[in-house]
Amino acid sequence: EDQVTQSPEALRLQEGESSSLNCSYTVSGLRGLFWYRQDPGKGPEFLFTLYSAGEEKEKERLKATLTKKESFLHITAPKPEDSATYLCAVQAATPLVFGKGTRLSVIA
Amino acid sequence: DVKVTQSSRYLVKRTGEKVFLECVQDMDHENMFWYRQDPGLGLRLIYFSYDVKMKEKGDIPEGYSVSREKKERFSLILESASTNQTSMYLCASSPLLGQGPIYEQYFGPGTRLTVT
């Protein structure tokens, strides 16, 4: 069974304090890994797709990386507006399997 | 920009009522999905559809049904609403999943359903 585990469940950072969120997965035949951002009371917003180990994608203060067993979402010098829940999802032969997310709070 | 819209942001229904949640996408996507999201449980797939009039069960289909009469519209139906169906319901769409590139899903804003 495909599984996605995100850690930590919650993370509190000071503004400017860089950190990483982890997404570990076990899936047979990974075809893609997705990162989403979700603000309270809203639908998830697509951030990145990663297809193969070694791939990296960047967007503003966010950088996503992928290995054969996990993905990291690195947040550099975060700002309060980066506060949100970040979701990871994997695609194999079946529809997306989502992790439970990491709730990020960035304090000014 | 891809746009997925859902008929209501907030909905309050009584136990036993039949409830319809509507979702419309404007990007001519083949795939459409219904999820529910609950604290501590994450996003769980209820039903999905690869084409008009086609449907597939997801992880938690019990108590739900779906309808896809037109490509752009995917409806979720709660035949007899119960309190344990109180949740945030999210619709999503994506282009065709084949042997080619994998496409991300685009989500609607969600419907917060409360069943009393």
Image (cartoon, coloured by chain):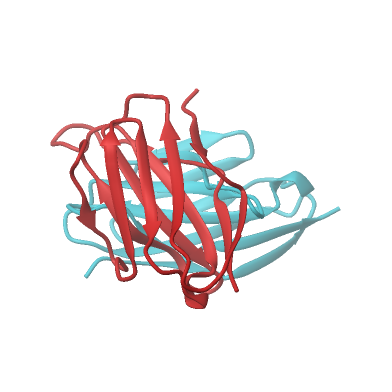
Chain colours: A cyan, B red
Where residue A43 appears, as percent x and y from the top left, is 55, 47
Image spot of residue A26 (x, y percent):
27, 66
Q: Nearer the viewer, residue A45 or A63?
A: A45
Q: Is residue A25 left or right of residue B86?
A: left
In the image, B52 versus B78, the foreground residue is: B78
Residue B11 visible here: yes
Q: Can you give x and y, in whole percent of width and height, for residue B22 in the image?
A: 45, 44
Q: Which is nearer the eye, B49 or A92?
A: B49
Give the residue drawn at x 62%, y 33%: A60
The C terminus of chain B lies in quadrant: bottom right
In the orientation shown, which residue stands out farthest toward the left? B99
Left or right placement of residue B101 versus residue A108 in this view: left
Instruction: Tally the numbered discs.
Output: 0
Residue B51 is situated, as x and y percent measured from the top left of the image, at 20, 37
The answer to whether residue A51 is visible is: no
Tell me which residue sits at (49%, 77%) in the image.
B84
